[in-house]
Amino acid sequence: MRLAIILSVILLFSQSCPLFAAGDGVPRSGGKLSETAKTSLLDQLPDDLEFVPGSIIVKFTRDREQQLSKSGVAISTVQPLLSQFSVDRMIQMYPSHVSRFRDDGSEIALQRMYRIEFDPVLNPLEVARAFAALPDVEYAEPEIVQTLMYTPDDPRYDEQYQYALIEAEKAWDITTGDSTIVIAIVDSGVRWDHEDLFDNMWINA
């Protein structure tokens, strides 16, 4: 059976399209989210999400752009957190990007996005909350581990209840089988000319 790979959570250019911002950055109104709003959005994340250890994404506000560089940020409110969380380095993700504006006036400013790397034993969500509370930060968020979910491209897949009962999709995330493995069907008969079986029938020679 042919299988199609579907991303269970697909974020095109996930670093460029953060979880909570409007588009990539400044809220559509042109204002800033309050510190309470930024941290409360993080609290709404599902409990079963897996995060990349030792890393978060932070975007700084427009009025701090002159204090940003490839080598780091010269913002006084940020420095205490860099020490508190044993930050190893700050990487400007898109240093050559130049701001552009949509028709509605909202800004696309990828150059203000940084990947902050820190002690991997720390909880990325808690580190993101701390950075999100800073007035000079537009948003901060952990990097979500994206997982694959395998599902068949059979147009009648939804009519076959048995796969859901045995949670087959979870097994397909681990393996989709091997064409060299022979499966014996113990039944009163088999429709060997079925389109899914005809080219896969094994004959004991």
Image: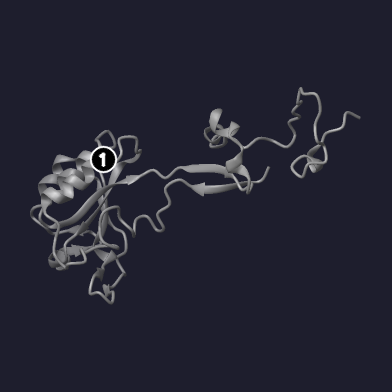
Please name the residue shown 73% across and 31% down the image. Answer: 181
- Mark 1 — residue? 124
Taking the image as shown, residue 148 lies to the left or right of residue 175, namely left
Q: Quadrant of the C terminus?
A: top right
Please name the residue shown 14% across and 43% down the image. Answer: 83
Q: How is the image coloured?
A: one colour
Foreground residue among 101 and 60: 101
Seen as rendered, the residue at the extreme left is 76
The answer to whether residue 198 is visible is yes
Residue 78 place in picture, x, y as percent: 12, 51
Please name the residue shown 33% across and 40% down the image. Answer: 51
Q: Name the quadrant containing residue 95.
A: bottom left
Residue 87 place in picture, x, y as percent: 21, 45
Taking the image as shown, residue 177 lies to the left or right of residue 125, namely right
**Is 181 placed above or below 7 here?**
above
**Is 165 placed above or below 152 here?**
above
Please name the residue shown 61% across and 48% down the image. Answer: 153
Q: Quadrant of the N terminus?
A: top right
**Is 87 placed above or below 201 here?**
below
In terms of secondary structure, where does tag 1 sit? Answer: helix
Q: Name the quadrant containing residue 55.
A: top left
Residue 48 place in picture, x, y as percent: 34, 35
How busy is the neighbourhood of tag 1: few (under 14 within 10 Å), some, or many (20 plus)? many
The answer to whether residue 86 is visible is no
Q: Looking at the image, how many numbered discs can be counted on the residues?
A: 1
Residue 111 place in picture, x, y as percent: 27, 65
